[in-house]
Amino acid sequence: MSWRSCPPSVAVEMADVRLLSAPFDPAGEIAAFTKAHPQAGGIASFIGQVRASADDSAVELLELRHYDPLTLPAMQALAQETLRRWALEGLLIVHRSGQMAAGDPIVLVAAASRHRREAFAAADYAMDKLKSQSWFWKRERTGGEWRWIEPRTEDFDDLARWG
Amino acid sequence: MSWRSCPPSVAVEMADVRLLSAPFDPAGEIAAFTKAHPQAGGIASFIGQVRASADDSAVELLELRHYDPLTLPAMQALAQETLRRWALEGLLIVHRSGQMAAGDPIVLVAAASRHRREAFAAADYAMDKLKSQSWFWKRERTGGEWRWIEPRTEDFDDLARWG
Amino acid sequence: MSLKLVFLGRLEDAAGVAEREVPFAPALRDVLAGLDSELSEALSGARIKLAVNGKLVAGHDLPMLADGDELAFLPPVSGG
Amino acid sequence: MSLKLVFLGRLEDAAGVAEREVPFAPALRDVLAGLDSELSEALSGARIKLAVNGKLVAGHDLPMLADGDELAFLPPVSGG
């Protein structure tokens, strides 16, 4: 009699979590993700990009720094938590690190579900957590000067919605 | 002295609303929409597609019927209402009519905003309204038989959230 | 003189066609009276809305009809 | 014998570098005492978290340090 090992958690295979140091194509990722989840009736997604600004104090560059031993593992844990909270067919989390200019994508979250409401809530939840609790530090270069950005109160308010 | 006519409402230009009788490419639309709104920090979107099903009673075809004098004008009115409710940089609503098979996109809503929360809420709101109050009638062909679909209670529950 | 009736959703099955021409009558009840009783009943359901020439009208607010008017019978929607 | 200190976010500006080696000391307070007082104070802030060898540790739960340990000082995050 032979013993079979336990199958890997389904949840692990349902999440695609990436920390990238080079630019990516959010719409291309959404297309591939949508195609990969034919059972899902709906795909909710969020793309965060570096904002173009017409202000005098236009941001010339934005830099996100991460800490290797913590950042990707915490993103993976967030993906698992999101999959436990909502009935999803799949979850995609892509986050940039490094320097970015206006128009560059920073983050993409996409959630595929049979039910619209679950897809929206999952994408919304994952974004709130990424914004307020993931291991990234942001600085902006304005007028040739780099400045570190502290978290916004708003991000904590967003997070408080999830109890 | 010459009189200048009133400028068109800004809101009108901010909404891109389409009723299509042929297939479309949601990810391509999201890419173009994102590019068209460089001032937006974020783009929230929802893609609804015809679900593939492994059931015995697999849906072979789905058909959406609309009524020309009502359907597109009501979609445009919904876009204006959504723009009034949230501070958006842009709003895209694309809806199919006609026959669709598994994997075909049915609907796309995308909202661009400076603030993540507004983009999510606007896309969510527009989808709820489209699902429950827009002038479409749906039928499905299963086992060679067409059957008209009545609205789901769930869709009205979703709508009730917006007061 | 005639009217055009448009049947949406499941009313298309009840009517057997998506649209049809009927002889002109100035009041909705006379139009319905000219149809077979099963269809007439389906069109009179509480959840059926009516549009005349592309504009929604409330039941008690129905205008007198004119030659060539288009009457669309609209059951509950089920979009997206 | 040495330790590696890693400074994230604005602590990088306070330290002038992203990481640096310091002589080994078994207790965090001795490590901090060996730095200039301004940096030491910045690293001791209430909102600064600490990771040892990639694992978060609570301030009162700090293990004895070992040769070659990596200490990362983590100010409040500001992602996405």
Image (cartoon, coloured by chain):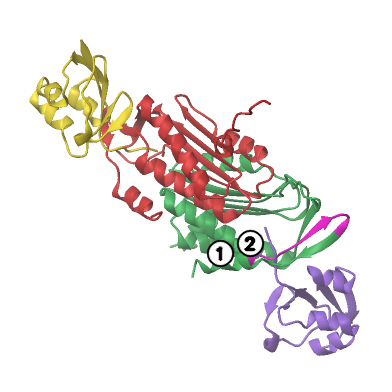
Chain colours: A green, B red, C yellow, D purple
State the residue position of label 2. Answer: A131
**C58 versus A14 height, above or below:** above
**A47 versus D77 height, above or below:** above
State the residue position of label 1. Answer: A158
| Residue occupying the point 38% across, 25% down | B68
**A39 relative position to D78: left or right:** left
| Residue occupying the point 23% across, 25% down | C12
| Residue occupying the point 66% across, 66% down | A152
The image quadrant of residue D79 is bottom right
Q: Position of residue C35 (x, y in %)?
A: 12, 21
**C53 relative position to A163: left or right:** left
The image quadrant of residue D62 is bottom right
Q: Is residue B14 magenta?
A: no
Look at the image and tell me in which quarter the N terminus of chain C lies: top left
The answer to whether residue B45 shows anywhere in this view is yes
Q: Is residue A139 magenta?
A: yes
Q: Position of residue C48 (x, y in %)?
A: 22, 35
- For badge 1, the amino acid type reads Asp
| Residue occupying the point 88% across, 85% down | D37
**D26 relative position to C57: left or right:** right
**C55 versus D59 height, above or below:** above
Is the residue under label 1 in contact with that under label 2 (CB below 8 Å)?
Answer: yes
C-alpha separation, residue under disc 2 versus residue under disc 1: 9 Å
The region drawn magenta spans A131-145
Sequence-wise first label, 2 or 1: 2
The answer to whether residue A4 shows anywhere in this view is no
Q: Position of residue A17 (x, y in %)?
A: 62, 55
Determine whether the residue tagged by mark 1 lies in a helix, strand or loop.
Answer: helix
